[in-house]
Image (spheres, rainbow, N blue to C red):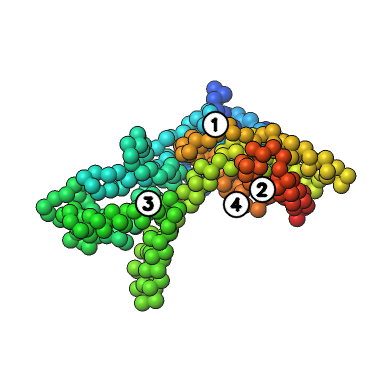
Amino acid sequence: MKDKISSLPSSPGVYLMKDSLGGIIYVGKSKNLKKRVQSYFYNLRSHPKKVKQLVGHIKDLEHRVTDTEFEAFMLECKLIQELKPMYNKKMKNPLAYTYIVIKISEGMRRIEITNNPGANDGHVVFGPYTANKNSVERAVQGIQECYKIACTHSHFSSSACLNHSLGLCLGMCLGGEAVTEYNRILGRFIALLDGSDRGLYEEIQQRMQEAAEQYDFETAAKYRDYMESVNIILNKEKVIGFTEENRNIVIIEYLSEDTIKLFLVKRNVILHREKLTITPSGMESLHAKIKTLIMNSFGADSTLLSSKVSREEIDEAQIIYSYLQGSACRYLFIPDEWLASGDPTDTDEALHAYLNNALTPT
């Protein structure tokens, strides 16, 4: 083990920890394989209990080098899904994913937070969220308390629920006009989650600012906590929405001054990857090669065009989305209409501008 660890490269990649029987018990990734793997065996007393247990079972390891950290993330995700190592519990356990389901019952929409949304049946479903269930519950609770829609009754009643007496329920449990107002607020909540209207979030932000201006810092802190929780699910909806667009993405990352890595990505799948060399005299042929790869790789593959992001896709989707938001790469979206027309002038001009920028070192 000491020899294997000392011989690890200081480059991106994936490491696979094995037990005494040769079974893979943990898969991890790192930008620096040697430094990351060494960290498991140094200062062991300060490690969490899970890590201490893992280290106690490690008897062997192997590694796989990648050109970029992005590839290490994607490879780790794929291996965890395939191998399901015992210590990668979050990726292994389907209950790690949470959904917000809005159901209609007795003419009133009700919010349910679940790990299994089941059949649609006309319900509105948001997710999957990789944040833990408690985080999603806090976000929903914040909205419910702010807008007094935290009703504890599951159906209409002749008596009000406990939250009504606490000022947390409009009285929709009693029926009448309160139900209309409740459903209107739920409509705004749905619009917040689907990205069409951020009004509810902005109103909470305004309430926080007003409370702070009145030196009511306890209330301001409560609204701030609500906003932080809501942000978790809003950011995840951005990832899901981005992935559902099924965009054709060209990505270039520099490996060295004269070497790049090209990725062609559709939805949550890397369709093509290739290491390419840049030379002053070969730019025209490099442009032509990349264009050919784009035209050949992107197409109307129905297996990649599902409308909703599944729980199997969300991890890769998050990796790709985060990668594009970072500064390591330069990317371009290729509209489907460019591909459908075969060889349009717009494609040439857009690609030429993109490649000129992407192939110029910063």
Is any atom of residue 275 visible in this view?
no
Question: For residue 172, which quarter of the picture?
Answer: bottom left
- Foreground tag (4 vs 3): 3
Whole-percent x, y for residue 73 in the image: 60, 40
As drawn, the label of residue 144 is: none
Q: Secondary structure at mark 1?
A: helix
- Residue for badge 2: 331
CA separation in Å, label 1 and label 3: 29 Å
Measured from the top left, where is residue 113 in percent x and y? 34, 44
Camera-nearest residue between 318 and 265? 265
Q: Residue 190 got which mark?
A: 3
Q: Determine the CA span between mark 4 and mark 3.
A: 26 Å
Q: Indicate which disc, 4 or 1, sits on the residue closer to the N terminus.
A: 1
Q: Residues within 10 Å of mark 2 (few under 14, many from 20)?
A: some
For the N terminus, the image quarter is top right
Q: Give the mark toward the camera: 1 or 2.
A: 1
Numbered mark located on residue 302 in the image: 1
Q: Secondary structure at mark 4?
A: helix
User: Tag 3: residue type?
Assistant: Ile
In the figure, 167 relative to 75: above or below? below
Residue type, label 2:
Tyr
Disc 1/disc 2 C-alpha distance (Å): 24 Å
The answer to whether 298 appears left or right of 318 in the picture is: right
Q: Is residue 200 visible?
A: yes
Mark 4 highlights which residue? 325
